[in-house]
Every structure is written in C-alpha cells, then in structure tokens.
Image (cartoon, coloured by chain):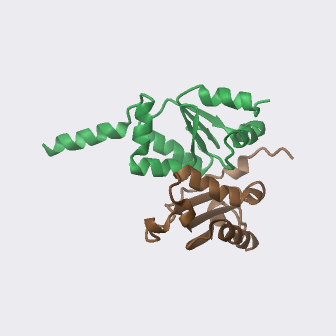
Chain colours: A green, B brown
Amino acid sequence: GSGSREAVERLVRAHPVVVFMKGSPAQPLCGFSNAVVQILRLHGVEDYRAHDVLQDPDLRQGIKNYSNWPTIPQVYLNGEFVGGCDILLQMHQNGDLVEELKKLGIRSALLDAEKEKDQDKK
Amino acid sequence: GPLARTIRAKLDAALQPTHLQVLDESPRHGGPPGAETHFAVVVVSGRFAGLSPLQRHRLVHAALRTELAGPLHALAIVARTPQQGEGDSRVPPRPPCLGGSKHERRRD
C-alpha cells in the first residue's frame, strides 16, 4: 500500500526537498503545514514535492511509522527526516536552513536579499 | 484538564524539568474550550544537553507516546537546557489554524 516502508522511501528520495503536509502548498489546510510552506517560500524554494496526507490515510500512518515521528507536517531534505514545523522554524532563524539548502545545491533567496542590503549600504 | 495533567506528569517523570509549561492550544484550532487536542509545551531540562533539536523533540515524543497515538493531535515544543535559560522560552507565535482537522478522511 501507499504507506509501506518501500513506498514512503521512494517518496522521500524522489526529490531533494519533500514535505508531507495537510493540504497543498497552494492551499495548506493546517497552520503548521502552512508555516512550512511559507518558510520554504521565503528561501525561494518553490520546486519541491508536497504530499497531502489528508488524501491518503495509509500514507499518513506510513510516514509517521517511517520517521517514528507522530505529527504532520514532516520535512525531508535529501531523503533524510529533518523535523516538523518547530524545527524548520528554528533552522530558519539560526541560519541552519540556508546551510542545509546549500548542501543540496539550492541557493537560498535570503542570501540574495542580504547581498542587496549590503549593496544599498555602499 | 485531565490530558494537560497527564502530559505534565509524564514530562516531569521523564525529563525532570527545571521549568515546564503545558498549554492547551486547542481553542486556537477550532476546538471548543477544554478540547485538549493541540498542546504546546515549554520544557527546560538538563536532559537536553548535547542533543540536537530533533533528538530533544524525540525525547518529548517518547514520554508522550500513548497520548500522541490517541487524543493529542499536535504538539508544539520548546526544548531548552537550563544553560540556555528560561528567559526566552516563549512559545513562538502560533500559526493560525486553517481548519485542517475538518478535512480528515478517517479510517474507522
């Protein structure tokens, strides 16, 4: 089924950035899922895989079993579970997210925003 | 409520926190007062020393495994060591609820 370990493994490895959430990036159905979408958007990450667990109860349980993490949303970078909304927010605030994205070959939009700020100061 | 007391008791036992706040945030997620489905916890404990945020959250989850498999739908966690101080242990502003629970397809 869609919640088996093999099925979930395929999903988390399909793309450098994979999110399991409630609703979709265009229409999140949960405040915590929306927070993940907004944080990724701030960093200019618009190309990622998002899976709506509300559409698939087997996947919803399967992803929790896979990561041994009891709640949604769940964020995976390079196939590795990173955490939920609280952890992503922490990573965003302390600069870790910019670094992790860099490792994936993704340049955070916030780096460009900072460059612009520096140029304004000249 | 009863779930809040259970959460407090289990976190006290598992983590011996120097500071612990248990907040029922269910009303912010469309539930009636006292629904006890969405909680936020602020835990200050020496047990977190040397652990990444992910590891700290997993410790909290482990203590509340039964509840998370049952009535507890969402759990926001602030996990700090006493060295990090209680001063900034505020729960970050909660994202507004978007009614997700109403869209669940339950397999009963």
Image mark count: 0
Camera-side residue of B50 and B96:
B50
Q: Residue at x 69, y 45 (%)?
A: A68
Q: Is residue A97 visible?
A: yes
Q: Quadrant of residue B32?
A: bottom right
Towards the viewer: A27 or A107: A107
Residue B57: % across, % down: 60, 55
Q: Residue at x 53, y 54 (%)?
A: B51
Give the quarter of the figure containing the N terminus of chain A: top right
Q: What is the x, y in percent for residue B8?
A: 67, 71
Nearer to me, A49 or A101: A101
Task: Name the residue furthest left.
Answer: A122
A22 to the left or right of B87: right
- The quadrant of the image that shows the C terminus of chain A is top left
Residue positioned 70% across, 52% down in the render = B101
Instruction: Please state the horizontal and vertical placement of residue B62, each as a whole percent of the image.
Output: 69, 56
Image vertical order of residue A57 relative to residue B56, above or below: above
The image quarter in which residue B4 lies = bottom right
Residue A50 versus residue B46 in the image, above or below: above
Any part of residue A43 in sight: no
In the image, is B94 to the left or to the right of B27?
Answer: left
| Place of residue A23 in the rendered image (x, y in percent of width and height, measured from the top left) | 63, 41
**At x 71% / y 73%, what residue is drawn?**
B5
Residue B36, quarter of picture: bottom right
